[in-house]
Image (cartoon, helix red, strand yellow):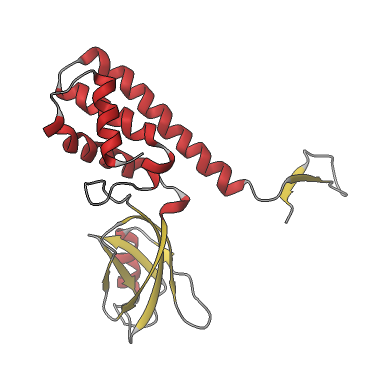
Amino acid sequence: MTYDEIKTKVAEYLNRTDLTSQMDMFIDLTESDINKVIKHQDLIKRANAVAETQYTQLPSDWSRVINVELNTSDHTTLLQQSTESLDLKRTSIDNVSGRPEYFAITDNAIELCPTPDTNYELQLTYYANIPELSSTNTTNVVSDKFPDVYIYGCCKHASVFLMEDERVGMFQTLFDKALEEVRLQQERASFGVGSLIPRRKKYGKAKKQTYYFKN
């Protein structure tokens, strides 16, 4: 469903024709809600950057980090820490520079520890925010595959704007249900490869069957 089609459908759901100037606001608010919840496989991206200082800026569209690794011959994966834990590790090594082993997310940047002693290429795998809908960017993965998320989200925010309290709860429920369906679809896509088969325990006391994925 396109940007214009969403606006038309929302107006039909609300039975209102006087909200044209507010539609972009409803869409923006809905996209903010979506980005807090949806982590879809089609939003996974990779980006490379050269790290030469303690901080390396994250991509402008990042939402959640999946993995950070040094793009070297052994592709070393860096371990994520909280900012506090990273500070403790930095203190424990007297802030000596070296090959990074840990990272934390600090103010839209990747903070590395130890601080790089030379240039290292980082490979970042992350979930991106959905591209914002507009007159020039008329579709994205959510509007294409899950248009009901946009429709119910916009109707919810429109009902808040119109102070129609009795409709806010209804559209919130529909919006939450649509988001849950996206989550379940992603879950099925993530674990749908192969089939589960039982593996029999041979020794010791009988226990529940253990399952593993067959390639």
Residue 172, x across and y down, in percent: 32, 24
Residue 193, x across and y down, in percent: 65, 50
The residue shown at (30%, 59%) is: 84
The residue shown at (44%, 48%) is: 40
| Furthest residue in direction top, as rendered | 166
Residue 128, x across and y down, in percent: 35, 55
Which image quadrant for residue 51? bottom left
Quadrant, the N terminus = top left
Residue 15, x across and y down, in percent: 23, 18
The one of 139 and 179 positioned closer to us in this rendering:
139
The one of 41 and 211 positioned closer to us in this rendering:
41
Which image quadrant for residue 176? top left
**Relative to residue 198, is residue 164 depicted above or below?**
above
Quadrant, the C terminus = bottom right
The residue shown at (45%, 33%) is: 180
Does residue 46 appear to the left or right of 31 in the view shown?
right
Which image quadrant for residue 29? top left
**Relative to residue 163, is residue 26 depicted above or below?**
below
The residue shown at (36%, 67%) is: 103
**Relative to residue 194, is residue 117 depicted above or below?**
below
Does residue 106 appear to the left or right of 182 in the view shown?
left
Q: How many marks?
A: 0
The one of 209 and 21 positioned closer to us in this rendering:
21
| Furthest residue in direction right, as rendered | 202
The one of 129 and 74 positioned closer to us in this rendering:
129
